[in-house]
Amino acid sequence: MSVFSVFARMVEQLADLLTPLFHGSAAAAAIVLFTALVRLLVHPLSRAAARGQRARAALRPRIAELRAQHAENPERLRQAVLELHAEEKVSPLSGCLPGLLQLPAFFLLYHLFSGGGASNGLLAHRLFAAPLGGRWADALADGGVSGPAGLVYLGLFALVTAVAAFTYRRTKQTMAKNPVTAGTADGERLPGLGAVNRVVPFLSFFTLVTVAVVPLAAALYIVTSTTWSAVERAALYR
C-alpha cells in the first residue's frame, strides 16, 4: 500500500465521520480539516522559523558594524559574522530549514488532492454542486460563472482574494521595516533589487491562478493552507 493510499484512506474515513454534519460535501470538509491538522502538526517548525528570524534580525546592527569594520577584508568579515552567529547561538539557516522540512508533507497533500497520488474516491465527491475532481474551466462549461459550480469557485476566489490582500499588506509593511540590501559594506542595493521588492508582495495573488487551474480538491488544500499561513504569520511575526 502506497503512502498516497494511506493518506487517501485517512481522508475518506474522516469524510465518513463528517457526513452527518456536511452530507454531500463531507469529503470537501474532510480535505479542509485534514489539511488544517497537518499544518497544526508542523506548526512547531513554523515557530522555530519565527524565532530564528527574530534572532537574526536582532543581530543586524552588530553585523552592520562588522561590515564597516572589515570593509576592506571580505574574508575577515565572513569569519567575524560566523563567529557572531556562533557566539549568540543563532544559525544562519534557522529561518529556512524548518520551512524546507515542511515541504514533503505539503507536496504529498497537494499530489494526493490533485489526483496524482492514487486512484481514490476523493475526487468523485462534490463541494455543493462542484465535483472535487473538476476545474474552473469545467464549471464555466457547465453553467458559466453564475452556474451552481461557478458560484462555488466565486466563493473560493473571494476568499483567496481576501487572504492575498491581507498577505500583500503585511508583506509591504514587513519589507518597509526590513528592507533587503546587498551584502556590501555600505549597504547599497543590488541593481534591480528595488524592482524585485516591488514585485514580491504581489506574489500572494498568484494563488488565484493556481486555484483556477487545479482540481477543486487541490484548490481546497491550497486555500486552506494559504489561509493558515496568513493567520500563522500574523500571529508569529507581530
Image (cartoon, rainbow, N blue to C red):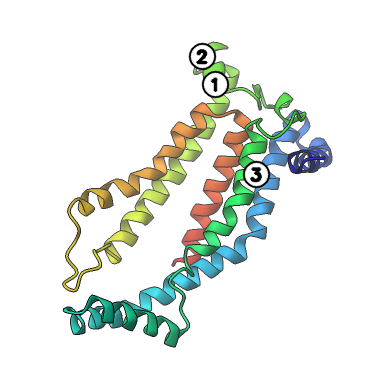
Report the side of 153 relative to 63 (left or right).
right
Which residue in the structure is indicated by mark 1? 150
Q: Which of marks 3 and 1 is in front?
A: 3
> Secondary structure under badge 1?
helix
Towards the viewer: 85 or 204: 85
The N terminus lies in which quarter of the figure? top right
Determine whether 143 is above or below 15 in the image: above
Residue contact between numbered discs 2 and 1, judged by CB atoms under 8 Å = yes
Residue count near mark 2 (Cα–Cα under 10 Å), binned few <14, some 14–19, many ≥20: some
Quarter placement of the C terminus: bottom left
Which residue position holds label 2? 144
Work out how far the residue at label 2 is from the one at label 1, CA to CA, in angstroms.
Answer: 6 Å
Foreground disc of the pair 3, 2: 3
Q: Where's residue 200, x and y in %?
A: 33, 49
At which x and y percent is residue 111? 63, 37
Could you tell me which secondary element the residue under label 2 belongs to? loop
Looking at the image, residue 228 lies above or below residue 157: below
- Tag 1: residue type? Gly
Q: 235 or 218: nearer the eye?
A: 218
Write the residue at 79% across / 37% down: 12
Q: Which mark is residue 108?
A: 3
**Which quadrant holds residue 224?**
top right
Image coords of residue 139 (percent x, y) = 56, 18
